[in-house]
Amino acid sequence: MDMPRKDITLNPHVAALPPYNAGMNIAAARKLSGRDDIAALASNENPDGCSPKVMAALADLNPSRYSDPACTTLRGALSAKVGVASDRIVIGNGSEDMIAAICRAVLCRGAPVATVSPGFGLHEIEALANGATVDKVPMRADLDFDVPAIVAALSKAPAIFFLSSPSNPVGPALSTASLEQILAAVSHQTLLVLDEAYFEYADDETPDGLELLSGSGLNYVVLRTFSKAYGLAGLRVGYAVFSDDRLARAVSSSKTPFNVNSAAQIAAVAALDDDAWMKSSVASMTGERARVAEALVSMGLRAAKSQTNFLFIDVGLDSQKAFDHLLSRGIIVKPWKEKGYETFIRMTIGTPAENDRFIAALHMLIAR
């Protein structure tokens, strides 16, 4: 007879974490919808795939050898691209890995953290996992940044302020004047984490956060990724640029070793070497984004202005019902669950054919 088992005590910070709202994968969508022709428009992946140079570079991969834990070649390539010394750059297993490492390196139990809502879930989740408290600044009713409210939150000198621009999941980017106003309010006690995962999709008037922060004297991190515009979502590789090498070393020490695999490092270096492919892909996507946004307006729907590869759309009914309707037609979107935004979905811009399917299926839902 088995002895009764007593449950072990769990870390209360982790046990109480809210779930991360991940997009449904294609295999699950096929099973639930009964369709093979799935349009995956939930996870902001690049429908163009990745540069042919990436695939060619991966042909020489030797998976029997450990990856370079320091990501030396990739950091060197990024140093040349962004004009920052390589000892201020840290590579991670996606920018999510960098968010977790930053929280481990900086936060103590009870530390105050602030971010924007709706926001990227891991800005909140990783802070809570490390025992921090999280204050959220809502977006304005017109789905743009509430800069005075952000400045007010910064006046409390949180240990970390997470700010994504362009915004995930909403889409707009801060103007130069707005970002400068925010930077002027950052205390030297605060680490500003500017998440620019969608930087490559923003228009020419959107400021380069790294450029504005350089020489500011602030403690900062700028996050970027190869998952979106470069099409390497499946390999998980992102990077962080730090205000100084001391902070970079602390965060690097908070990561597990070898956590950026060899394939990811090789692919990222090759992707950087084909800027023309990336820019062509971005141009195609931004044209499709404008076309889909225009179709939404013609249906009487509201979508936030976007400087990303997705649209945040108020469908006027429960987002789960909209998700179910679209899934039944082989289309995956992300239903938003955050309080106050339960009628919103986030739709990734796909191929023209996938976007046409989405528009038709959404029109059918609205007409019903």
Image: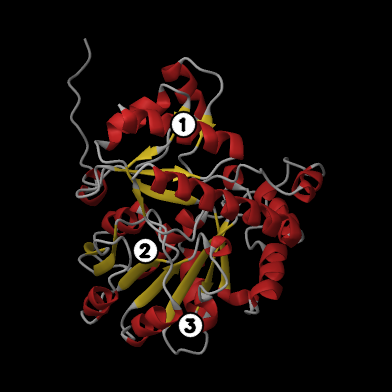
Which residue corresponds to the image point at 47% horizontal and 30% vertical from the top-left?
331
Q: Which residue is mark 2?
A: 103
Q: Where residue 252 appears, x then y in whole percent?
A: 51, 66
Q: Earlier in the sequence, mark 1 or mark 2?
A: 2
- CA separation, marks 3 and 1? 44 Å
Q: Quadrant of residue 283?
A: bottom right
Q: Amino acid at mark 1?
A: Ala
- CA separation, marks 3 and 2? 20 Å
Q: Which residue is mark 1?
A: 360
How many marks can you see? 3
What SS does tag 2 mark? helix
Q: Where residue 28 appears, x then y in whole percent?
A: 45, 24
Picture disc at residue 181? none
- 256 versus 30 height, above or below: below
In the image, is 21 to the left or to the right of 6? right
Picture disc at residue 213? 3
78 or 12, nearer to the observer? 78
